Amino acid sequence: TSQAAQDEAWHSEGSEDSGGEQSDYDTDDEEAKPIEEDPLYDPDADDQDEKWMEERREGRVSDAILNCPGCFTTLCVDCQQHERYHHQFRAMFVMNVNVDKTQQLRPQEGGGS
């Protein structure tokens, strides 16, 4: 593709070409139409989520929130920081965890990791 085509593809409203002003209207159509609000956006969702979490914690304050590093699933919302080893935390109450009691984990011989 040519440089002119690439420049055209990246051109957007509100750039220096339009004086830096952004419009509430989509000007690509022949007639200007108001831009619709996102139907999935809820301006009160964060406040509602915070209230829900405070109810679950029953007044306890958490030092951290623990999530799975692979899928980001929340595992614990009530963690305590270790008094001596500040980079370590312990999970007080876990969620979204299933323990397979039919399996037993053992350390490798020789202390290998």
Image (cartoon, helix red, strand yellow):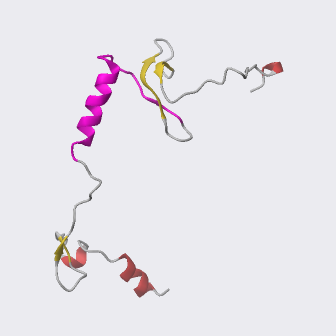
Is residue 107 found left or right of 48 in the rendered image?
A: right
Q: Nearer the viewer, residue 2 or 38?
A: 38
Q: List x then y, in percent, for residue 112.
A: 78, 24
Which one is in front, 98 or 94? 98
Quarter of the rendering containing residue 38: bottom left
The image quadrant that residue 106 belongs to is top right
Q: Residue at x 34, y 23 (%)?
A: 56
> Is residue 63 highlighted in magenta?
yes
Task: Report the residue that reaches farthest toward the front.
Answer: 102
Above or below, 61 against 15 in this view is above
Residue 32 % position (x, y) = 16, 79
Q: Could you tell whether 35 is left or right of 49 in the image? A: left
Along the line of sight, which residue is nearer the eye, 41 or 88?
A: 41
Give the image quarter of residue 5: bottom left
The span shown in magenta is: 43-68
Residue at position x 78%, y 20% in the image: 111
